[in-house]
Image: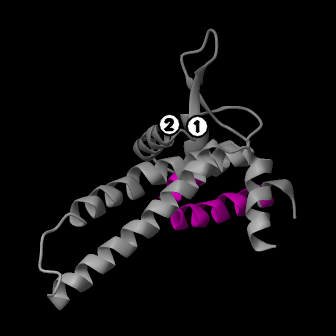
Amino acid sequence: MELAAAKLKFIEAWGKLGSEWGINRTMAQVHALLLISAEALTTEEIMETLSISRGNANMTLRDLIGWGLIEKQHKAGERKEYFFADKDVWNIARQVAKERKKRELEPVLKVLNELSNVDGDDKDPEFKTFKKSITDINKLAGNVDKTLETMLKAEENWFWGSILKVFK
C-alpha cells in the first residue's frame, strides 16, 4: 500500500473510532489528518484533503481546539492560521478522557448525588429498589471517576504497569 492510500485509510479508520469515543466522524477525521501531517495545515488544506465545506471545517477546528486536541498557530508574515495536533498518543488519550469526564461523567455524578438524597420509606419495596440502584450506580460511577483521575495524573509507564499488575 502506498503512503497516500495508507493515510486515507487511517483517516477513515480514525473517523470511525472517533464516533465510538463520542466525537463526531468529521472531527475525528480532521484530527487524524493533523495527527499524521508533518507540518501544520491551513483550513483550506484541510477542506481540500477531506472534501469538507469551510463552515464544517471552521466548526470542527473550533471543537477540536475546545477539546484540547489541536492548537492554532500563526506564521510570521502570513495572515493564514495553521493547525497542528499533538502527536503523543498518551496525551491524546488523557485529553479525550478528561473531556469525556467533564462532559459526560461529572453531570451524571451530580444527578446521582442529588438522587441519593431522596426521601422515602425504607419498608417500601419501590423505594428500596430505587435507593439500592442509585447507590450502586453512584458507587460504580465514583470508581470510574477515581480511575480516570488516576489516569489523568499518571505517566504512561506507571499507568500501564499498574493495570498489568491487576491482571497478573
Q: Extreme right residue here?
A: 1
Write the start and end of the magenta stretch as one range. 6-28
- The amino acid type, in three-letter code, at marker 2 is Ile
Residue 33, percent across and down? 66, 47
Q: Secondary structure at mark 2?
A: helix
Q: Residue at x 48, y 48 (%)?
A: 99
Judged left or right of residue 27, residue 119 is left
Dots 1 and 2: beta carbons under 8 Å? yes
Q: Which residue is mark 1?
A: 70
User: What secondary structure is the stretch in magenta mostly built from?
Assistant: helix
Residue 137: x and y in percent read: 38, 72
The amino acid pointed to by label 1 is Ile
Image point (80%, 57%), residue name: 161
Secondary structure state at the residue bearing disc 1: strand
Of residue 166 and residue 159, the one placed in the foreground of this image is 166
* Quarter of the image where one finds residue 13: bottom right
**Quarter the N terminus occupies:** bottom right
Residue at figure coordinates x 73%, y 53% from the top left: 159
Residue at mark 2: 65
Please tell me whether residue 11 belongs to the stretch shown in magenta. yes
How would you rate the neighbour count of disc 1 (Cα within 10 Å): few for under 14, some for 14-19, many for 20 or more? Answer: many
Image coordinates of residue 64 in percent, x first then y, are 51, 42
Residue 23 visible within the image: no
